[in-house]
Amino acid sequence: MTSAPQIRIPATYMRGGTSKGVFFRLDDLPEPCQVPGPDRDRLFLRVIGSPDPYAKHTDGMGGATSSTSKCVILSKSAHAGHDVDYLYGQVAIDSAFVDWSGNCGNLSTAAGAFALHAGLVDPARIPENGVCTVRIWQANIGKTIIAHVPVTNGQVQETGAFELDGVTFPAAEIVLEFLDPADEGEDGGGAMFPTGSLVDELAVPEALVPGGHLQATLINAGIPTIFVNAADIGYTGTELQGAINGDAQALARFEALRAIGALRMGLIKDVAEAPRRQHTPKIAFVAPPADHVVSSGKAIRAGDVDLLVRALSMGKLHHAMMGTAAVAIATAAAVPGTLVNLAAGGGERTAVRFGHPSGTLRVGAEAKQVDGQWTVTKAVMSRSARILMEGWVRVPADSF
């Protein structure tokens, strides 16, 4: 019996924010994988090493976490006024599934840098020294992201003194602007608050929440997100990964609540659909500030933050905060009366600093009411990115 040889595909392994992923130029993909479909999905599953019943990704580039099981495709933009089109795939760990339903805010940072590294930006627009403004069309959700990428001697400046909690070493700062991040098209339900309410009361089984009712803010901004109060589900908002991810019953409860929220948001038609839509919506719990210690051992004082947020991604508590969820936090905090805003003390605000399991993050958003409906013009945050490895990724030729 003759086995298929390995083929090699040009690829770049990058960190963006608190995530890592394998980046491809569209034109470098095998021809069957240059268009959406099962061939592309099978290729990305093999690149990452999924599905993996051992949950290790030993035979692939993934890291067996939601933050490290990601693939990205970039190409010169087909949209006027943009430099590149950026498509993101969240690869499931234990099932043969690639979720294309949302964006990765962290890897949006790396998308801006990779656009320069890969020669996808007009050289005339790249300063010899300064900041290059990269206009990105986020193809998953049909939105514009502007990445302000530092450049030194005509190349992306990757090293620097900017520190990001959740990332071990400092790097150069990249500022991201998410323009009009609310209302993710038909998939997002057509409104920033899809139910029309800032706070909804979800009917849930009493086995999940005593009393059978749970308050939630359901928002489409950055990524569809379900926010609930930590105290309402028995938490403080200071929890680290071990407190949640080591508790199978807790994870099952969060997934059940996420499915109920997704149904209320109109993202699924039946809760049974939720397992096939792992990437969206996210579920997060919020709490007022409190003294606590984060995963690095660093002490965070209540006065250091405006509120505490813990968020789950792909069924597990995230070690820091997803970039798209940070956009949702910034937007919800800017709207008086949401659970996020109330946890931060209420009132009007254009920025918040929130605590997450690895430290703190400051995010901003500009929100306003138009004809009685809340809208957000942009959300802003700082991240960093750098190339970890570049060359070729190899997969068996019969992978797709």
Image (tube, rainbow, N blue to C red):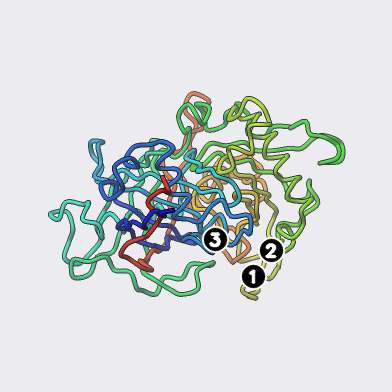
Kindly report which numbered mark, 2 or 3, lies closer to the viewer in this rendering.
3
- Measuring 82% from the left and 34% from the top, which residue is drawn there? 205
Q: Could you tell me the amino acid type at mark 3?
A: His
User: On screen, 6 above or below 398?
Assistant: below
**Disc 1 on helix, strand or loop?**
loop
Tell me, for residue 240, which label it has, or none.
Answer: 2
Q: Earlier in the sequence, mark 1 or mark 2?
A: 2
- Mark 1 touching mark 3, by CB under 8 A? no
Q: Nearer the viewer, mark 1 or mark 3?
A: 3
* Horizontal side, residue 382 vs residue 235: left or right: left
Secondary structure, mark 2, is loop
Disc assigned to residue 295? 1
Residue 378 versus residue 183 in the image, above or below: below
Q: Tell me which amino acid carries mark 1.
A: Ser
Looking at the image, do the residues carrying marks 1 and 2 touch, with CB atoms under 8 Å apart?
Answer: yes
Q: Which mark is residue 57?
A: 3
**Residue 290: which quarter of the image?**
bottom right
Residue 334 position in % (x across, y down): 54, 44
Image quadrant in which the C terminus is located: top left
In front here: 275 or 360?
A: 275
Q: Residues within 10 Å of mark 1 (few under 14, many from 20)?
A: some
First in sequence: mark 1 vs mark 3: 3
